[in-house]
Amino acid sequence: MIKQDFGPGHPPEIIVSMMQQQPVLILNSAKSLTELYVTKNRFFEKDPFSAIQYGSLFGKSLVLSPSNEMWAKKRKVLGSAFYKDKLLKMVGVIREIVREKIVEIEREYVEKRQEMDVVSELGDLHMRIILMTAFGLTDLHQVKLPYIKDGVTKQMKVADILRLLISFIIFRGGRYMFAVIPYMIFFYYSKEDKEYMANVHTVRDFCNSIIERRRKELQASLTEDKCGDILTIMLQDSQAFPTNDSMIDEIITFFLAGSFTLKTANSNLLMYLDCNPKEYSKLMGEFKETVFAEVLKKENKIEDPIASLNIESVEGLRYFSQCFYETLRIEPPLAASGGIFTEDQELSGVKIRKQDFFLINMQLMHHDKTEWQRPSDFIPERFDPLNPLSLKPDGAKRHPLAFNPFIGGKRVCLGKTFAEIVAKFVVPALLGRFKFEHVDTDITKGIKPKIVQNLNQACDPIVPMRVTIVDWSQQI
């Protein structure tokens, strides 16, 4: 819509569109974010419509709740999950899950020479990591629950059910009925709505049973916090999380937000590296000189890449971090994020009334031609402060908020550090053992692929790739 109305140039800093019978301000420039995240941050809240639209699944989670005293308590407790001591516990779990997945990939796709759907398989890997760090249970990804669809009940994995539920609730918000009669969004009146609510209750009842089991184990001193999981942290603070429902809200939110962000970013990174051989070669060179240096002195192959990865070694992966950020820049997992002001404000010279809805257009900001050189190209070096590509096209310093994949201010994503840590273990481990190549070679030539929807993975595209053992003797 923006491209149609404003052409190839950058649109105005703030534009207004009508959505759901109300005006929506769309913030297209990083300049407006300085005020939003700093001087006027205390008036920045998530929009109430999101709480209505997603509340049936997320309940009163931090993502949807207003920033009151209880919100602050919950955020402080959950924030402690990503302190260094907790992350160190999580790393041990992440390492074992990644090692297990590497064995599966080699058995199913290398030895059998089958094509691998990279989005699906990385989704499965990150689902296991998230479930383990949320619940502290190793076998939860195998558990199946009843799922109702079109009057038929079948058994499905918990993670697959959650993905289908979030897909349903997103598309439900776009119904024509709600544009005509907005208040109808409060009512789950259709057959599909009723099945959705039944499936939500199934998942929440399952989460409740896990909480009760863990509570009894903690009371009997049978469970030790070995992996720093979110559930154990919440159970130890009854003031911030007085009810099981309050914990379930955060667990479901953490799972869906975390697994989607990680799956999107890391599968995209594997795909971009295959399309950009120069950058792939440079990244493999960094791996060869740092995390895999010792093992490669002995032979030109790596049987167990995860054994070479630890907190200290991955923290030094500078070029990998640049590749990861560049992937988030080109395709941010969340293209836009909405909010409101709790009082009348003025933002970048535009007067905004209390409760007016605005959208932060991250996708457009990440491709702003006034901030980024060659914004459509995959150029990790733009995140190297010593490289000229880190500057604006006119040579000036880039706006610090031009890159904004995790929002900012008091609403900044709690899992930002966690996402980066997981990426630094998952992607180097996979690339240390395998080479991933698109089956559709047109993609590597810059030709856009035909998107095939994977109906079993809730709107995920199918991206087939060939997987082979990487030949380290060929890496410069």
Image (tube, rainbow, N blue to C red):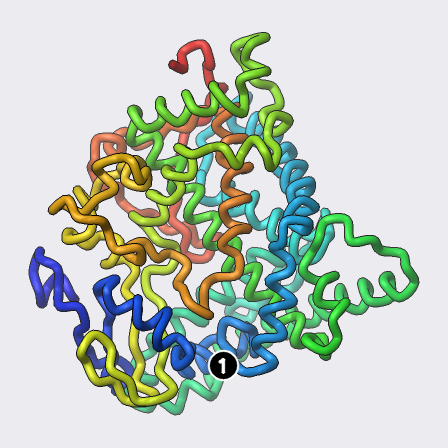
Q: What's the residue type where badge 1 is placed?
A: Pro
Identified at 17% across, 68% down, the residue is 13
Quarter location, residue 232: bottom right
Identified at 59% across, 72% down, the residue is 200
Residue annotated with mark 1? 66
Spot occupied by residue 344 in the image (x, y as percentages of width and height): 30, 89
Q: Is residue 156 visible?
A: no
Quarter location, residue 88: top right
Relative horizontal placement of residue 143, taking residue 469 as reference (left or right): right
| On screen, residue 85 above or below 104 | below
Relative horizontal placement of residue 198, taking residue 187 as reference (left or right): right
Spot occupied by residue 50 in the image (x, y as percentages of width and height): 42, 77
Question: Regarding mark 1 in the picture, which secondary structure is present there?
Answer: loop
Along the line of sight, the residue nearer the viewer: 366 or 289: 289
Along the line of sight, the residue nearer the viewer: 272 or 194: 272
Relative horizontal placement of residue 150, taking residue 172 as reference (left or right): right
